[in-house]
């Protein structure tokens, strides 16, 4: 008996939705450091772009409450339409349903704010009414407290949502380092957004493989000059 949830994510079998990655929504996040959250969201967006994942961006009450989508996220997808709505649940907007259907992928990777409201309601409704599989990116989403995020994740997992993290998704899409067509772009994302892992990649490139350092500005290293010791 086949189980589609045992299939790994590939660039061909999934789509991506960013739900309400907006400043006023981020102001309320307490479950994760907000700078880390933004870093993870943008890293995930860049990964989706590298692997040509069909991507949707939704917003809620932009002018009256939530503010504009993070510009760093929008710049990853120049020219992409933003799907505005009034409901806390993206599934309640027909544009979102139509976009999901048009993308033609039943596996939906989700990054959004807040976990316990907009992510939760979208996930449950998309599964129940649209027969989608939901992959919730836990560290590219945030709730108004750690408990709000954690218990919302637990509720969704009990309902069949699959929890993932942003770097897990990135590397699942890459899968094999022999896929050279995306290798360099993935390494660029890792070096910029993956913290200690990225530092290790920088070290290996420069110290082991003798590649030039990746900063864009020029710097001269001045040799040591011992000072007199009394």
Image: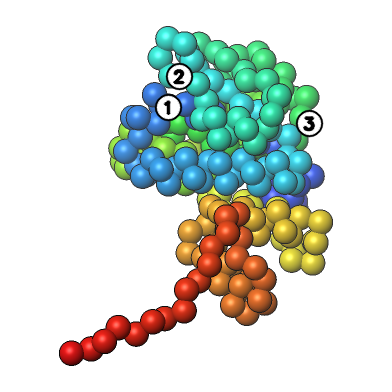
Label 2 CA crowd tier, 10 Å (few <14, some 14–19, many 20+): some
Q: Position of residue 183 (x, y in %)?
A: 74, 60
Percent across and percent down for residue 112 are 50, 33
Color encoding of the figure: rainbow
From the image, tell me which residue sits under label 2.
Answer: 67
Residue 142 visible in this rendered orientation of the protein: yes
> Which circle's residue, 3 or 1, is located before the other in the chain?
1
Tell me whether circle 1 and circle 2 mark residues in contact (CB < 8 Å): yes
Left or right: where 53 falls relative to 110: right
Residue 58, placed above or below residue 84: below
Question: Could you tell me residue 151's position as x and y percent?
Answer: 37, 40
Q: Secondary structure at mark 3?
A: loop
Q: Secondary structure at mark 1?
A: helix
Rounded to the nearest angstrom, the CA distance separating label 3 from label 2 is 30 Å
Q: Kindly report which numbered mark, 3 or 1, lies closer to the viewer in this rendering.
A: 1
Q: Residue under circle 1?
A: 23
């Amino acid at each position: 008996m086949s189980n589609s949830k045992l299939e790994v994510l590939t660039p061909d079998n999934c789509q991506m939705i960013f739900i309400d990655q907006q400043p006023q929504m981020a102001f309320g996040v307490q479950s994760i450091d907000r700078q880390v959250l933004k870093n993870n969201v943008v890293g995930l967006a860049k990964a989706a772009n590298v692997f040509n994942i069909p991507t949707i961006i939704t917003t809620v009450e932009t002018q009256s409450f939530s503010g504009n989508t993070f510009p760093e996220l929008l710049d990853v997808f120049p020219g992409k339409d933003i799907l505005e709505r009034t409901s806390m649940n993206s599934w309640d907007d027909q544009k979102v349903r139509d976009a999901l259907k048009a993308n033609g992928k039943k596996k939906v990777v989700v990054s959004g704010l807040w976990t316990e409201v907009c992510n939760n309601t979208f996930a449950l409704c998309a599964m129940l009414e649209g027969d989608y599989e939901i992959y919730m990116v836990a560290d590219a989403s945030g709730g108004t407290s750690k408990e709000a995020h954690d218990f919302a994740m637990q509720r969704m997992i009990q309902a069949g949502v699959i929890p993932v993290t942003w770097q897990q998704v990135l590397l699942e899409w890459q899968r094999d380092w022999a896929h050279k067509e995306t290798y360099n772009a993935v390494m660029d994302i890792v070096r910029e957004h993956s913290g200690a892992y990225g530092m290790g990649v920088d070290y290996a490139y420069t110290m082991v493989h003798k590649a030039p350092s990746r900063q864009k500005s020029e710097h001269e290293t001045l040799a040591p000059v011992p000072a007199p010791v009394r």
